[in-house]
Amino acid sequence: MRPPQDNARAIFLIILIFWLATSPDSGPGLIAGPALIKSRVARQRQALGVLNSTQWGDFAPRLSDDPPETEPKYLNLTGFREEDGYVWEDLKRFKDRCEEWSKNAVGVPEAAEPVWQNATGVVHGSWQRINASLPRYHSSYNLSAISPSVSWAAPNSDWGRNVTGAEGKIMVRIEDNEDDETEPEKIDKLILDKAEIKARQVSGTINIDDIEGTGSGWEMRLHGVHWPRQGAMLLTTTSEKFAGVFGLPHLTTRPDFFESSQVLLNRSLDKALEQKERHTLLIEPWTSTLDAPSEAWNPTLHCEYLLYVQIHPLDQDILGVQPSLTGPENVAKAIQDVEDELRFPQGTGHRSIPRLQMSAVLFSPDCAFFLETKGPPAFAPADGIHLVGVKQEIFLYSVSTFLLGLAVIIFGQLQLLKMQMRETSTPSTLGRVSFNTCCMMLLADGMLFTGAAAWSFSASTTLLPSLAITCVSLLSMTIETFFLAEIHKVQEPEWRRQERERERQNAPANPTDTANPPNRQTPANTAPLVSTTPPIIIPSDQDIDAEIAEVETNNANATLPPPATAATATPSAQTLRAQLSNTFGSLLFLGICILFLSLAAASWRPSIRAAYFNTLLFGYLSLWVPQIYRNVHRNCRRALSWRFVVGQSVLRLLPIAYFYVVPGNFAFAEPDWTAFCALAGWLWVQIWVLAAQSVLGPRFGVPRGWMPEAWEYHPVLREDNIEAGGLPIGLVLSTPSSPTSSLERVRTGEEGSRGDKKRTNSTTTNTHVIDCAICREVLEVPVVRAGSDDPTAGGVSGVLARRAYMVTPCRHIFHSACLEGWMRFRLQCPICREELPPL
Ligand SMILES: *[C@@H]1O[C@H](CO)[C@@H](O)[C@H](O)[C@H]1NC(C)=O
Ligand SMILES: *[C@@H]1O[C@H](CO)[C@@H](O)[C@H](O)[C@H]1NC(C)=O
Ligand SMILES: *[C@@H]1O[C@H](CO)[C@@H](O)[C@H](O)[C@H]1NC(C)=O
Ligand SMILES: *[C@@H]1O[C@H](CO)[C@@H](O)[C@H](O)[C@H]1NC(C)=O
Ligand SMILES: *[C@@H]1O[C@H](CO)[C@@H](O)[C@H](O)[C@H]1NC(C)=O
Ligand SMILES: *[C@@H]1O[C@H](CO)[C@@H](O)[C@H](O)[C@H]1NC(C)=O
Ligand SMILES: *[C@@H]1O[C@H](CO)[C@@H](O)[C@H](O)[C@H]1NC(C)=O
Ligand SMILES: [Zn+2]
Ligand SMILES: [Zn+2]
């Protein structure tokens, strides 16, 4: 029998998978597809012909300050025509900005400083937006004229990637691959020193966060050309309304850039188109969206971008070139050495690697704005130093280090868990541990496992550390699952009993309840309880220590009586398994939902994204809350050892701390001390509550009546209760005025009145002295005098005084430490074998 929500879950999953599998292809489908692609490839062939047949200066659009008699020149390329209406009036301004940026960074072209030759790396920084000279709106464009045969999705709404705020953040990830096309095409390795690569194809991913404007962030892929000698790059988006990569040579700033890029693109685009003509379903290599298939069928409108990047020269102090050898050739040679050492480490000594720094200008020719990175000379270095980051090798190194550290942390968690499981091996101790706390740990480790496993599939450099994480978290998951199964086995009867009780409470008129846990000690309740269970006193030579030792050595849990299950029939193993797998199913479902939501969160606006992750982590770090609740609910404490609680808290907080407080973390997350302190403080508070529960009692400070009644092992003892039978056996012996038949038996069974002296130590309490049956040592019990009120009864000191002794429902009294030790193995009174409510 499957519960109905199980089916709902399955249906939801199927819908999710279906949606994921089908949503990209909402276009013309397979029949119209090939024809559509053919016509598109034909258009691109024509564009390549334009690229092939044009020269430097063929694209000279009308500038805003041009005299009217000058003859502007346009290209017959989508987006580059006069009638398309893009703001090419600002092309000169764009080129001027690029030249200026380069000059600020490396100096004049004739004496440019050497820079990194391999730009592969990650940089980030902030930008400011500058209006183009003329505004443009989406209504400024006649899309059916610009791209006649294309059906746009939602053509009349605002375009995507439309930056409106004055400032924001940007992250640029450059992939400068050795295997990409270069100009000249082939280099004779023997004369490598003389022949140099003039231009190389390059691609980059940029994330723009428009914090002040739309609040959104966009991720896009740009393709273009890298001129390694000069350290300049020009990248562009390409779409159905902008033939960016085909017109790219015309957007460069210098004739030599034009020539090298034209030759390079002529060849590489020709190759790409040839491949497309053969395999029509290939996606374009120059597409700018990351979910390329949907873009092919149903393109969405977004602003086009040109990105000019200038790599900055290296910090020569860090590079460590000798002062006598600071000529450009020597610096270039030193850079070459560092890059070789980074890529193919030979172990030639550790030295610090200079950072990767770039400045960038973005220009959107259709949405009419510039984005410029902030930094000197226009801004003080405190406001921004353009884009800074690290080269890929350094980035991967820090990722690997983080992953290895994470693996060690999970291993530590695993050790703590194993230690805790050794301590928590009996039904009585398992009954105290909160199932939900362990579920949260399992959920977190399971998600980590999923993430690490997925990462391992695509990781090359970080394969080993991510495999380590996968293995350790799998191990951790397995052991947690086992632990959960044990807890479930012990606690399941209790849950069923609660279920039945709820049902019974709903059904009226059934007051007597045999399965009820023993009630709090009130005169009305205890009197019948005592009279129905006359105490049976075991002979004093009963060797309780030996019995404990025997149980300790005999570690088979199966022989131990399950706690407090006498009233309920044991469920079959099959239903237990079914329930457990149901629980794990829910956890899996929850984990999948959180994973999908977190993936989706990557594209949310930054403030919402931060709020989402803070909330998620807050929920995760609330992991002791269920344990606190269980302590209160069951009136038990010391469920988990201190080493486990503190160790797990610290270990689980450490990876979070990396992203919240380490400034140069590889995710480029901004340090957020406030949020981190809130999270850590919340964890701290939970640990303190657990500590207070352990010292002052789990229900200290919780109003009575909030929680179901549970046996109070540390009651206030008062002499008034003698008549009602409320005082523990043995204590009442000194009071001659209350002889009852059961108490007479006590006198004969125990060693008589050996320890029954009565001492007065205050005006309100007497201290009775009695022997503890477990350790045979003296136990001093404060008893409140008849007729008086103990002022400390409700306070901390009263609570602490009462911690010394424990009174069982069968009215036997012991040292707390003795009875707690005993109850780890048996939930029976050591004297009369009466069943004890769990601690
Ligand atoms: C490029 O132009 C040359 C002539 O300038 C022509 O022979 C060649 O076929 C063209 N190639 C392409 C790919 O258009
Ligand atoms: C521009 O190219 C299209 C084909 O892509 C052609 O039909 C049109 O005549 C060309 N326009 C000019 C002005 O050359
Ligand atoms: C940029 O243009 C918008 C209107 O398109 C205007 O509201 C804004 O003030 C302009 N910003 C600057 C700095 O001129
Ligand atoms: C970009 O946003 C501005 C301000 O909201 C708007 O006026 C303009 O039409 C948008 N541009 C496009 C192309 O959607
Ligand atoms: C847009 O272009 C189409 C075809 O070139 C033309 O028929 C139509 O009138 C134009 N629309 C506007 C509003 O200019
Ligand atoms: C640059 O470095 C990366 C990472 O080591 C490497 O994959 C790439 O091939 C290198 N590119 C060049 C042009 O050497
Ligand atoms: C472009 O490539 C073709 C061969 O595909 C070649 O014939 C032509 O000369 C090239 N054009 C330029 C401008 O390099
Ligand atoms: Zn004792
Ligand atoms: Zn007893």
Image (cartoon, helix red, strand yellow):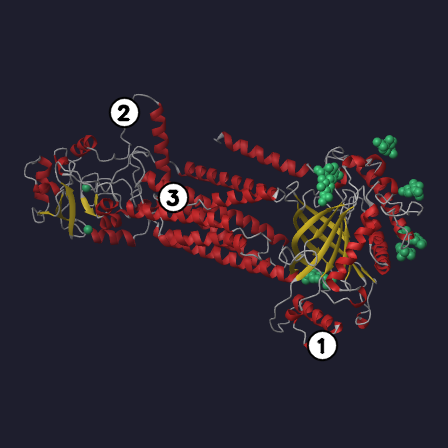
**Is label 1 or label 3 in front?**
1
Q: Position of residue 563 (x, y in %)?
A: 30, 41
Picture residue at 30% right of the left edge, 46% below the top: 559
Judge from the rendering whether residue 505 lies leftward or rightward of residue 153; answer left or right: left
Label 1, label 2: how far apart the Cα atoms are: 97 Å
Front one among 177 and 809: 177
Q: Position of residue 646 (x, y in %)?
A: 40, 53
Q: Secondary structure at mark 3?
A: helix
Please name the residue that numbered disc 3 is placed on.
Answer: 627
Counting residues from the N terminus, which is met first, the one under dot 1 or under dot 2?
Answer: 1
- Tell me if mark 1 has few (under 14), some (14-19) or many (20+) residues whose alpha carbon lies within 10 angstroms of its own: few
Give the total number of marks visible in the rendering: 3
Counting residues from the N terminus, which is met first, the one under dot 2 or under dot 3?
Answer: 2
- Tell me if mark 2 has few (under 14), some (14-19) or many (20+) residues whose alpha carbon lies within 10 angstroms of its own: few
Q: Amino acid at mark 3?
A: Gln
Picture residue at 60% right of the left edge, 61% below the top: 397
Please name the residue that numbered disc 2 is placed on.
Answer: 511
Q: Amino acid at mark 2?
A: Pro
Judge from the rendering whether residue 491 lies leftward or rightward of residue 760; answer left or right: right
Q: Is residue 677 visible?
A: yes
Please name the residue that numbered disc 1 is placed on.
Answer: 325
